[in-house]
Image (tube, rainbow, N blue to C red):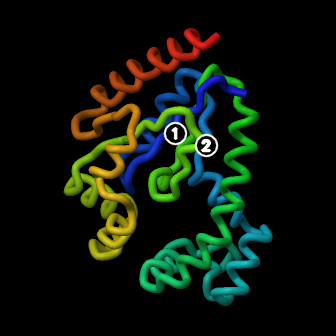
Amino acid sequence: MSSLVIGLTGGIASGKTTISDRFASYGVDIIDADVIAREVVAKGSPGLQDIVDEFGPDILTADSTLDRQTLRNIVFSEPAKKEWLNALLHPLIREQMQIQTAQATSPYCILSIPLLVENQLHELVDRTLVVDIDESSQLERAMSRDKSEQAVIEGIMASQVSRATRLAAADDVISNNKDLNWLHTQVEQLHKMYLNIVNENL
């Protein structure tokens, strides 16, 4: 198991994947809650069957996989449905995050959790790394990436904690308001710092 677990978090379209990919290029093990969230509702999984039982067969695509866009639109317009879905998925995702974190072998590992602050998952990590981005850039990136309407993205952003609240929970911050070189420089600096922390604790 890694000696240090870094919780990477940030709002929608803040750049978490780009950053975790850069950490991975240094040989750092990445445990991604979004990847796990897809795995626990993969085709043929018990999690997907529970969702079909609750939402009906129209929640599936033609090839019997989960229609994520339809599900997203439903849960963000019906709070009770969102609560039901969270009650199903959160324990499944949490269990897999803990298993995969325990299996990490790099000196430190990254546990990427978009809703780390919202779901108060600080006990799963040793340090919290927040990706910070201004709201206008975040909205623009999310609309472009997800091909979603502005109102849908704004609803998702509103359901997440505020920028200030997220920053208040941070041990470390990466600013994603400039170019890729600036982003990579910040990752390199943090990588060195985290290795130093590990070495100091040996």
Depth order, front residue of 159/20: 159
Residue plotted at (55% across, 83% down): 81
Depth order, front residue of 59/85: 85
Q: Secondary structure at mark 2?
A: helix
**Residue behind mark 1:** 7
Residue plotted at (30% across, 43% down): 132
Say if mark 2 contacts mark 1, CB within 8 Å: yes
Q: How many numbered marks does the figure carry?
A: 2
Image depth: mark 2 or mark 1 in front:
2
In screen coordinates, is 104 left or right of 118?
right
Q: Point out residue 66 in the picture as x, y percentages from the top left corner.
A: 63, 73
Q: Point out residue 134 in the picture as x, y percentages from the top left corner.
A: 22, 49
Q: Secondary structure at mark 1?
A: strand
- Above or below, 123 relative to 38: above
Q: Point out residue 156 in the picture as x, y percentages from the top left corner.
A: 38, 68
Name the amino acid, label 1: Gly
Residue plotted at (61% across, 52% down): 35
Name the amino acid, label 2: Leu
**Residue behind mark 2:** 124
